[in-house]
Amino acid sequence: MVEIMRMTVLASGSKGNSTVVASAETRVLIDAGLSCRELMRRMAIAGEDPAALDAILITHEHQDHVAGLSVLARKLRIPVYFTEPTHRAWVRQMTPRSTITYAKWLERVQQEKEERAARVAAEMAGDDGSGDLDPSALQLVAAAEDAEEETEAAPAKSKADPANLPAVEYFQPGTGFSIGDLLVTPFTTPHDAADPCGFVFESASERQRMAIATDLGYVPPNVKAALKRIDVMLLESNHDLEMLKDGPYPWSVKQRVLSRVGHLSNHATAEFLANEYDGGAEYIVLGHLSEANNAPELALLAAEEAIRERGGLLGNRVLLARQAEPLDPICL
Ligand SMILES: [Zn+2]
Ligand SMILES: [Zn+2]
């Protein structure tokens, strides 16, 4: 059978997320939440060729989704797709506040003083604006030009700018776009980031559909609508409510996770699967499990029970995405 689409979850969980989605002619990486080196290692393990990637798509700017982004994108020289607010938030996050040493500051002050002196000398030397400069003033002008060259050389530093990317493409949630033969429809998710989203991917030829929906506090109507007619669904099952309540997180963090802009619990995911989901997926991959506040067996049990309650659902194999190692590629 000819493979039409493929999803390879390289990592999923609160400590890093990254997934490859491929159609016949296009391969994209969704999020890059591990170091570049680790992402490369995992792609090798899973049989995904990094050099064949066409683009990186970012769901939101949280560290567990972007940790290796800039290094990986520069290494592979591929464009990165963001929403504009997410890109802006990421750049802010990546740009260290500029502090300079006292020595650097002195140097800069001195330089400015010399430039000013040169300018003044040049002006004074030529009353009519075109007069000959005396030799000492010429020297000063030359010094000022040198200084300028130095400041103009400064953009070389921007090559080391951590937020520098080979190319940036903007998309808008709710508006589909294509990368090669892959149709991408981003949808807004309720999560405490600048402009978070999930994605539906569709192969242009065969109408096969895959979705990624993690990092959402609840399942709002637009997400329910996006998750119709999906063949492979990576769905968040972040925490067990009891484990979270009794767990090690400080109260404020527990509140955040539980909030409408936090993460889906096993219970909320099961509820969605039992009541709202259309039942049509071949695979449901449970992802973004919290290591501190969940147990894989609990997440699996809750989802499988919810599906069993539906009765007679064919397909619907439930898999668990892992934090520490990639899943085998899921092929359609
Ligand atoms: Zn997040
Ligand atoms: Zn996350």
Image (cartoon, grey):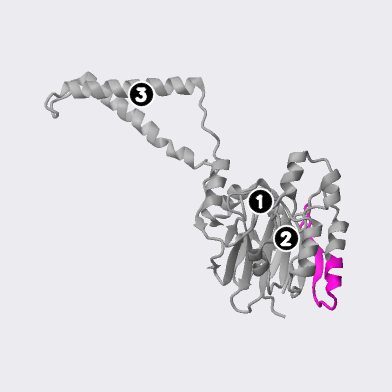
Rendered image quadrant of residue 21: bottom right
Q: Residue at x 61, y 54 (%)?
A: 196
Q: CA distance from mark 3 to mark 2?
A: 54 Å
Local SS, label 1: helix
Residue 131 in the image: above or below residue 303? above
Instruction: Check disc 2 and give the amino acid type.
Output: Val
Which label is found at residue 9?
2
Residue 322 in the image: above or below residue 228? above
Local SS, label 2: strand
Rendered image quadrant of residue 282: bottom right
Q: Which residue is mark 1?
A: 65
Q: Position of residue 164 (x, y in %)?
A: 52, 46
Q: Position of residue 227 (x, y in %)?
A: 68, 68
Q: Which residue is mark 3?
A: 112
Outermost residue to the left:
128
Q: Residue at x 79, y 41 (%)?
A: 249
Relative depth, front residue between 291 and 247:
247
Residue 118 in the image: above or below residue 217? above
Q: Which comes before the other along the chain, label 1 or label 3? A: 1
Q: Which residues are magenta?
A: 304-328
